[in-house]
Amino acid sequence: MDLTRFWSWLLCGASCVCTATQCPAAVVTRDVCVYGATVGGITAAIQSARQGKSVVLVEPGRHIGGMTTGGLGATDIGNKGVIGGISREFYQRVAKHYADDAAWRWESRDDFFAHRSKRTTLEEVSGPDATMWTFEPHVAERILNEMLADNGCVVQFQQRLSIATMEGQRIVAIKTDAGDVYRAKIYVDATYEGDLLAMAGVSYRVGREANAQYNETLNGIREHTPKNQIYGGVDPYVVPGDPASGLIPLVQRGSGGIPGDGDQRVQAYNFRLCFTNVAENRRELTVPDNYDPALYELAARRAEKIVESGKQPVLSNFCNPVWMPNSKTDINNSQGISTDFIGMNYDYPDGDYATRDRIWKSHKDYILGFWHFMSTSPRVPQGLRQEFASFGPCKDEFTGDAGWPHQMYVREARRMVSDYVMTEHNCRGKEVADDPVGMAAYGMDSHNCQRIVQDGAARNEGDVQQHGLKPYPISYRAIVPAKGECQNLLAPVCVSATHIAFGSVRMEPVFMVLGQSAGAAAVIAIDADTSVQDVDYQKLRSRLLADGQVLARPAAKSAGPPKPRLTADGAGPPIICFGDSITKRGYPEELAKLLGKQVFNAGVAGNSSRHALQRLQRDVLSLRPEVVVVSLGTNDSRVAEDRVFVPVDEYEANLATIAESCQRAGIRVIFCTVPPIDADAYFTRHRREPFEQRGGLPAVLEDYRAAVVRVADRNALSIVDLNQQLAMRPDWRDQDGVHPTREGNRIIAGLVAEAIRQMPTPKAGNARSAAPTSRQQLGGAGG
């Protein structure tokens, strides 16, 4: 690229718009090319950039963020505790934004949380690590733009994919309809449609699988659709009761198919409507040029049925407004006749751009016409008309699009088919992926797929609402193509999942989580010069955990340590003891007496290094201590028990992750080796044979001790060799052969206190002020 072309490209990137008419075609070369600036694409780009790779983010449209900035402000998620990493950073930034009084123009914060907020409480948005899960679209877009800018990520807009050039099973370049070419080592398809994966020849599926294919129960054509149904027996014929007169609009021909069979039908799309009932901020609703009130005959008949039943229809009979801050809504489809344009999107997933544009416009026109009809038609009772008419697009949202969302809700399009397919069994916890890169936490959710005649009435088919599921892991193999297919592509949005499992996975916070994992995997693949299918999962796992990702279901609240006392500036105690039951049994309390400082006991019984990594952010990093004392390994080394056993190589990698994460945060680290164990007492409760196969209990413990020493040496950390020191003090140990007595706690506390006293005084800029930018800034660690 010559200098003139380079500066033209750079200026276009900075202004966030580059089209074929604005600048000449470019050839852009980066380590990672992310196609699709959905939230999954954004987190993939940020993660790769944070790990030192050059990145370009290529977006087909004019905005970033997909549905998160396109009107879906009422975040759908079950257990928020499984959302970590960059995804959680976003929701923390949302909370920080709304903590400012200046963010509240159209209502007060107190009024919102007291009377309108249903998904977030005032308590949740308070404190240093607060998160907020409801927000205005323009706020989300601003925050995401800031996060991209903070990490040096440039976005190229209005770049629709045209060609993917392949060499063998690798993408070497993609070309857009603007004429620009993007070359990269690794590509990430983060679109809702999966256009790049399809163009790269990756296997995919559209529509619903038969239940029998994966032995599921909620896939395929539904025999019964009890929810989001057209209740009351609404007549579907032009002349009521006369099939010969034909069907009224929005009712499809045919029987609908055989229950349980698969089909090509796609669950319905709509737009999520950010409307307001504040007159000063409300735009007048635009009426489509092709508006025809006959299209909404079904809605009129439904309203009339409600009246016939002796009730007055209300807004919630036809849609679901959820309040966002500043008297705005996220209005979604609800009930049987609403904003979903059922059956009108089947050609979208595999459609060309002209087809998609037509479908996009038809959905917009349908919803605008629906709202106008419900606000003005004499067929609609006056009270209901007034409710609809009181809402309209916001003047301060989507200002470049006359208040209309820039993203259609493409709930599902293509789904990759890889070596691992997420199914209903994963959602129910009956099958558990052993290579997680994120957690799903929402129910199995599908919107309707068709509207047909059943028993003489208009009926919807396809809706599934199966909630109450526990969080479950999503496999790394579900975001990479099958072996033998494209080797340098990751797909964190159109993941390998059945229709019904995808309905659980497809939540925006989860797309962020999977995007971050894809970005980290891209870096490992580049550094190892390997395919995405052959990425070292243990390296990936350690990286994700170090960066705050959550890869397992959080332990019950009672299993964790109590919250420590915080200082006025929100900092935690100066010393944290982080470990298993050896820690929990009480030496931190003795340590506090010896040092005269607050010490937080973050020991959890039964924890291995795997468990510790999952809570490192919560119990250590977020509290910003001066020193953390890490004592783990007694459970990792229990080779006879798969529930807690962690192989020594993984144990060493986990300890390294803990050490490096703390050092990056400016926290000084002391490692304790695994204490000695009395074999006679131990083997009254544990099987001896697995240890004998590895040379005996002392040999196993020495392997784990050596791992601690290696990590400490590599990272210049202080070490308390409990294995050697306690072997000379048999009075330290309880009758169970493992845990300390009261005297043992005093002995361990004395050894740890001496190690802390010998540590150099921390320099300015440690964890309790500003985090260091490199290891050279650390306060130092004794040998």
Image (cartoon, grey):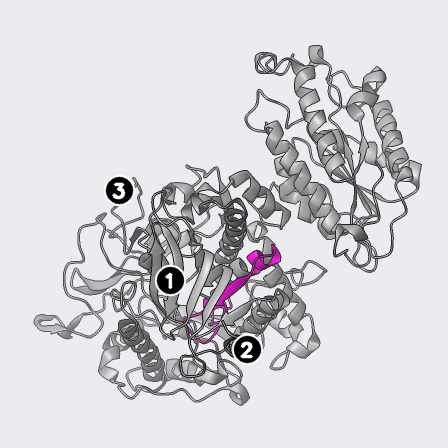
Residue type at mark 2 is Trp
Q: Are marks 2 and 3 in contact (CB under 8 Å)?
A: no
Magenta span includes 54: yes
Q: Are marks 1 and 3 in contact (CB under 8 Å)?
A: no
Which circle, 2 or 3, is nearer the viewer? 2
* Label 3 packing within 10 angstroms: few (<14), some (14-19), many (20+): few
Q: Which quarter of the rendering shows the C terminus?
A: top right
Residue type at mark 1 is Arg
Magenta span includes 519: no
Residue 75 appears anywhere in the view:
no
**x and y percent of residue 173 in the render?**
40, 61
Sequence-first tag of 1 and 3: 3
In which quadrant of the rendered view does residue 402 lie? bottom left
* Label 1 packing within 10 angstroms: few (<14), some (14-19), many (20+): some
Disc number placed over residue 411 in the picture, else none: 1
**x and y percent of residue 196 in the render?**
36, 60
Name above or below for residue 503 compared with residue 371.
above
Foreground pick, 342 / 778: 778
The residues tagged by marks 1 and 3 sit, at their Cα atoms, a distance apart of 22 Å
The residue wearing badge 3 is 213
Foreground pick, 419 / 729: 419
Disc number placed over residue 149 in the picture, else none: none
Residue 136 appears anywhere in the view:
yes
The residue wearing badge 2 is 7
Sequence-first tag of 2 and 3: 2
